[in-house]
Image: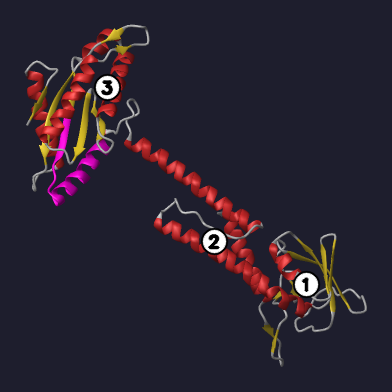
Amino acid sequence: MKKTMLLASVCAALLQACAPVSTPGEGSSTMPRSSSTAAANALSLPAYYWRLVSATDASGKSIPALQKGVEQPLRLSFTADAMNVRGGCNAQFGGYTYKDGVLHVANLAATMKACEPALMQLDAAIGQLLDGMRRIGLSKDYTTVLATHHKDEFGELYRGFNAMLREIRVRDEKLSQLATTDTLTGLANRGHALESLQTMLTRAQRLGRPIGVMLLDVAHFKQVNDTHGHPAGDQVLRDIAHILQANVRAYDLAARFGGEEFLVLCEGADLPATADMAERIRTAVASHVCRLADGQTLHTTVSVGVYAGAGPHATAMQLIEWADQALYRAKQAGRNRVEHA
């Protein structure tokens, strides 16, 4: 970013240096604007592109400072870096020699006029890059890739900017994952689940479709932690998370809702479909053997409360509350069972 702004300011300075000026009593001249920073009226060009080393008149006499309005033949010595402004100007110069990084130009006015297309090319290249950067900044679409035909330093600048966009995309993906994922189980976290449920509900109410909601509770989970330790409890939760992921549809959302409770959202699923999925999950958990790090094994079960629907006036929290009421009945009836609202 800093390099881009630097190039933009350099290009602006170059264009200013090449802008025509008027001298008293004369019309417009193609001579560059003068600088007040060195000797009075001395030529000033940014060192990033050209730096005046020496100037002589036609007889070879050294000229300490270039004056505005001078139209006599001159021999100017410039150091030039590898920017395409050099290549662009060199291709159009008449009466110049270039050796060991020094450009000797015969006539200042003709030189600056010849440089103008190359300088405009630079201005256009920088303008395109800045326009692309502004669009991306406003849209926040960091998947964009800025294309360019440049193979010189500007090409490197575009590639550098695109690399920065890739880094931003990777960073945003990581931040999004951290913000929406439960770190222990890899499932969605509570906040992301509630946001997703609200989105699903709004869509379901608009289209007149149901939503299947499941709340699951791990049986006697506190006893697992007290008897085998918290690492064992963590392993039980991870195993159940894997079972959920293996038994829900690709477009369903499984989440850790809190502690030993899990939430499953099944968009478009009616009560029979949701209850059938809940029964498959319950059976899979009951038959699963959880293997602990110390070699011990555990068996556990889950109770599941199911609700399916999306009334026109229902809220996201009401759907969860109705599923929770069904879960309470499942636990009261002996656990390891599915109940629906």
Q: Nearer the viewer, mark 3 or mark 1?
A: 3
Q: Secondary structure at mark 2?
A: helix
Span of residues in magenta: 191-215
Instruction: Write down the residue under mark 2.
Output: 129
- The quarter of the picture where the C terminus appears is top left
Q: How is the image coloured?
A: secondary structure
Q: Nearer the viewer, residue 102 or 93?
A: 93
Examine the rendered structure and indicate whether residue 325 appears above or below residue 334: below
Examine the rendered structure and indicate whether residue 111 appears above or below residue 243: below
197 relative position to 184: left or right = left
**Hey, which quadrant is residue 3 in on the image?**
bottom right
Residue 331 at what x, y percent from top left? 10, 20
The structure residue drawn at horizontal position 29% and vertical position 27%, both measured from the top left corner, is: 246
**Hey, which quadrant is residue 39 in on the image?**
bottom right
Q: Of the numbered discs in the image, which one, if any, rests on residue 240?
A: 3
Examine the rendered structure and indicate whether residue 236 appears above or below residue 4: above
Q: Nearer the viewer, residue 206 or 319?
A: 206
**Hey, which quadrant is residue 40 in on the image?**
bottom right
- Helix, strand or loop for the magenta stretch, by majority: helix
Residue 208 painted magenta? yes
Residue 319 at what x, y percent from top left? 12, 37
Tell me which label, 1 or 2, sits earlier in the chain: 1
The structure residue drawn at horizontal position 69% and vertical position 91%, both measured from the top left corner, is: 27
49 relative position to 230: left or right = right
Q: What's the residue type where badge 1 is placed?
A: Ala
Tell me which label, 3 or 2, sits earlier in the chain: 2
Q: Nearer the viewer, mark 3 or mark 2?
A: 3
Residue 133 painted magenta? no
Q: Of the numbered discs in the image, which one, if any, rests on residue 39?
A: 1
The structure residue drawn at horizontal position 46% and vertical position 54%, both measured from the top left corner, is: 144
